[in-house]
Image (cartoon, grey):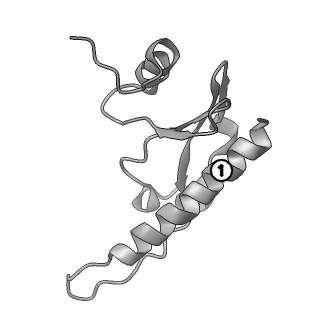
Amino acid sequence: MKIEEAKALVEDYLRKSEIEINNFGSSLPNYKNPNIKLRIINEETEEHDFGWVFYYNSEEFLRTGNVEHSLVGNAPLIVDQKSKMIIETGTAQATDVYINNYKKYGDPHYESD
């Protein structure tokens, strides 16, 4: 698998996530659907022995830098080049913790007893 294929997998994943986010809605008065578009932050993509780590945010934030449009809780995504799977990391720990767990244990969320 090449990075272009991994990127295409993540872009497809983000399109599906956009649909879920934008269809979520709210019962709050005057709610306006934000019509969020998600984009990969290409310059932050990391290559590892197992594949790649992709970071993303809203297109509006990446375009304007306005933190009002920044996502919260958007955990980086691992793409394993052998299995072609997308694995969500997390935001509770530093990204390196998730990456190192994936390298050692094949699970970014591994916790020792």
Q: Which of 57 and 7 is in front in this view?
A: 7
Measured along the vertical axis of the image, is residue 83 above or below residue 13?
above
Under circle 1, the secondary element is: helix
Measured along the vertical axis of the image, is residue 90 above or below residue 71?
above
Residue at position x 48%, y 21% from top? 106
Residue at position x 34%, y 73% from top? 24
Percent x, y for residue 105? 44, 15
Residue at position x 62%, y 58% from top? 12
Left or right: 99 as drawn, with respect to 3: left
- The quadrant in which the N terminus is found is top right
Percent x, y for residue 95? 45, 27
**Looking at the image, can residue 109 be seen?**
yes
Left or right: 89 as drawn, with respect to 82: left
Q: Local crowd at mark 1 within 10 Å, few (<14), some, or many (≥20)? A: some
Percent x, y for residue 72? 37, 50
Q: Residue 83's quadrant in the figure? A: top right
Q: Residue 26's quadrant in the figure? A: bottom left
Measured along the vertical axis of the image, is residue 74 above or below residue 104?
below
Three-letter amino acid code at disc 1?
Leu
Q: How many labels does the image show?
A: 1
**Looking at the image, can residue 62 be seen?**
no
Percent x, y for residue 20? 42, 68
- The quadrant in which the C terminus is found is top left
Left or right: 75 as drawn, with respect to 41: left
Q: Which residue lies furthest to the bottom in this view?
A: 30
Residue at position x 42%, y 25% from top? 107
> Mark 1 — residue?
9
Measured along the vertical axis of the image, is residue 64 above or below residue 53?
below
